[in-house]
Structures are given as C-alpha cells and as structure tokens.
Image (cartoon, rainbow, N blue to C red):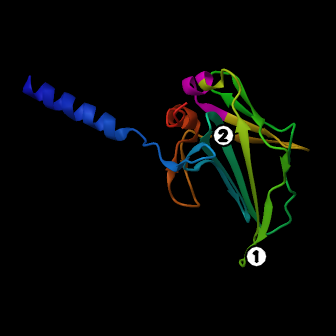
Amino acid sequence: MKQLLVFLSFFLTSLVFAQDPCEISANVTDSIGTYQSTKPYLVYEKNFGEDKSYLYFSLAITDGTPTLNFQHIRKSKSFMVADCFNSGSKLYLQLQNGKVVTMVYADAGDCGTGIRSEDGYSNRVLSANFYFTKGSFEDLKKSPINFIRVKYASSNTNYIIKSALKSELDGLSYEPESYFQRLLTCLKL
C-alpha cells in the first residue's frame, strides 16, 4: 500500500510539472484598456539552401477580444516577392478531425517590412492579427491542427504542420500540432 501511495504521489507530481507553462510576454492594464499576449511560438520552419521561412503564432486578448498574432519571417539571398494581406485575407486551419477553422484578418492591409542584413540576406517580416470566428475555440481545443492555408491578397500559401519540430534556428523542440490545445487556456477568455 505504501508503495502504491509513493507511486501515485510521484505520478501526480510528474503530471503537474509536465504541463507546459503559459508563458505570457505582455500583460498590461492601463487607462486605455487591457492587453495580454503569449510568447511567440514556432509552428513552421523550412530551410532549403539559402531560403529560410519561419512561421510564429502567439495568442492575445485586447479588452476581451481574442486574436491570433501571426508572424512570417523569410530570409533569402535571392529576390523575394512580397506577400501582402488585405481586407479579404484569411487564415484556414485544418484540424486532424477533418474540420476547417477560418480566421479573419483584422487590419486594413500590410505587405510587411523588408530588411537587408550585413550577411547578404534579404529578410522580410510580415505580421498580422486574425480574429477567431464563432465556435472556433471549441474545435481548436478538441483536435490538433495539421495544415494551414494563408490567403494573401494575391495568392494562397500552404503549410504542413508537424507534430514535433526541432528548430534549426534556435535548437529548441516545439509541438506545433497541439499549439491551440495547450495554449488557448492560457488567456482568460
């Protein structure tokens, strides 16, 4: 009986410490309102020759309105066409259970920022906010994502999402498929 209690105690303790902590990068309340955001999380990485692409998500809530912060960073030594968002842009998340969650672009339009680095790379950073649609929280909490389609102003880009990702950029391990299942509970909705 004593061994069972020790085992049960160890098991419960390991479950508590195995949980991913909610890393909040911003938590502000002032006279204008409230803002809370999770730390950016790598959900996609592609390195092919001298072309590199990184996709980061973070969740935010501003005065009670939840959004998904989307950031796409590209690096290349060759010319890069700018992907732009406009009022018709959307983000489609295909879940493993077959459902598709649609998120709506929250701003008027943006083509990102181009930066030339000293090492000869052209860098393009595109950031955007997307609104969750009605009922999407429940779907995202129930099933992992396995595919993302971004509808830009003039094209669509598809991203296959892995269950586990060991980043070449920072050497850290990520679990992009279960991003929403783990982090939607971090924000007080």
Left or right of residue 78, residue 185 in this image: left
- Identify the residue at image location x=86%, y=56%: 82
Left or right of residue 12, residue 139 in this image: right
- Identify the residue at image location x=87%, y=39%: 87
Q: Amino acid at mark 2?
A: Leu
Q: Quadrant of the C terminus?
A: top right
Stretch of the chain drawn in magenta: 138-146
Left or right of residue 134, residue 141 in this image: left
Write down the residue under mark 2.
68
48 is higher (above) or lower (below) than 64: below
Find numbered disc 1 in the image and state the secondary structure of the residue it sits on. Answer: loop
Write down the residue under mark 1.
120
Camera-near label (2 vs 1) is 2
159 in the magenta segment: no
Locate residue 75: give its quadrant: bottom right
Among the two numbered marks 2 and 1 on one chain, the one whose residue lies closer to the N terminus = 2
